[in-house]
Amino acid sequence: MKLSDFLSAKPLFYDVIDYDRFPRAYDQVREHLPTQNIIHVVGTNGKGSTGRFLATALHRAGRSVGHYTSPHILRFNERVWTRGEEITDEALESAHEKLSGLLPPTIAEALSYFEYTTLLAMVAFEGCDYVVLEAGLGGEHDATNVFDKRLSLFTPIDLDHAAFLGTTVETVATTKLRSMGALALLGRQKHPEVETIARTIAAARHAALYTLAERVTPKLEAIAWHLATKNGLSDYLRDNLLLSMVAFELLGFDARKELFDQSALFGRLSRIAPNVTLDVGHNPLAAREIARAYAGKKVVLIYNTYRDKEYREILSILKPIVERALIIDVDEPRIAERSDLEAALDELGMSHAPFETIDDENDYLVFGSFSVAETFLKRMKP
């Protein structure tokens, strides 16, 4: 069965997660997968861009590198980046064929979409010197956590996926930070309790934990500022770039400007037209960074949201920069009811209407999940 058909039969999301299913599958194939130099990227925001900055630098330094990220916007291939580019359809099918031969059919069929694609990516990364592996929604129980790690890299942690991770920063941070390996780097955090929890876990595990503040140097700060200005990176993307540079040096390399001279991963404050910016953030932490980036300006917000997201808080954060909101219809079962979203906008006193099209007179911000980005891009494509 072709990969596309095999994956289409799998649900993207589960109400209940079987935490033992993936480790059992991994035991079947572990001897065939990369085990060296795995960098595990965990957090609430910034995983994709931080991972890509690091993977690109390792590639430019002459190493063979795989980068696994999720979800994708338009093509599944976006999730599997290897040796400097997105994986080809042919390479994906080859990896699927090999994985299908390694896994008993009952186990392969039982795996979730994310679990199977995690193993698929690792098969595709055979022979890579380094693998940058982005966690999904969690940390401790995430499928990506079964692999031995050279470095655990933690981006900013905040409330998200409350149904699975908990309703307080402490519970979310604990779940994510329990994925910590023997060497860990903690990025800048909004909540001080995140660092406290990280140090407690590191001490219990005798892990070497460093914070960005402890490892950053004036040289790295200067390079990050220069490249952020040159490539139009926002403050939070500059922080992600700096975190990747410090991680690069923790791995034993010298962070040079030419290795990190790059734009962010597509979908992270990406200017896709002269008056249209797209960002796939979909939680309060992402909204705060967007509001900071647009402070003093006004945009027309093109928006929709999953019903389990804190969309009232998100809209409240964005309100100072939003002239009006346009609700884009998204064909996805987890999308919030239109009436609930409109009620939230009304409560906040935010003008809104259904999204139809864009014009040349306004600046637009497409903000929300990957599904929102995908829907907008497909509607606007000539």
Image: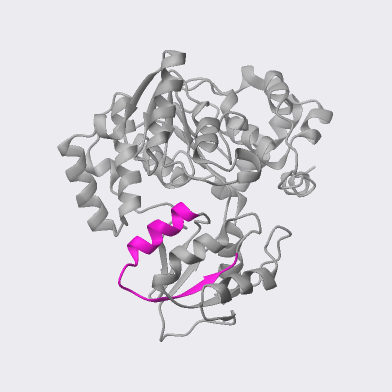
Relative horizontal placement of residue 366, taking residue 217 as reference (left or right)? right
Magenta residues span 284-304
In which quadrant of the rendered image does the C terminus lie? Answer: bottom right
Q: Is residue 300 visible to us here?
A: yes
Q: Is residue 381 visible to us here?
A: no
User: Looking at the picture, does residue 353 appear above or below residue 93?
Assistant: below
Residue depicted at 71% across the width and 66% down the height: 331
Q: Position of residue 38 (x, y in %)?
A: 47, 26
Residue depicted at 29% across the width and 43% down the height: 260
Q: Is residue 356 magenta?
A: no
Residue depicted at 40% across the width and 42% down the height: 50
Relative horizontal placement of residue 298, taking residue 111 as reference (left or right)? left
Q: Position of residue 237 (x, y in %)?
A: 35, 51
Q: Position of residue 211 (x, y in %)?
A: 32, 30
Quarter-of-image position of residue 271: bottom left
Q: Nearer the viewer, residue 40 or 197?
A: 197
From this viewpoint, which residue is outermost toward the top? 206
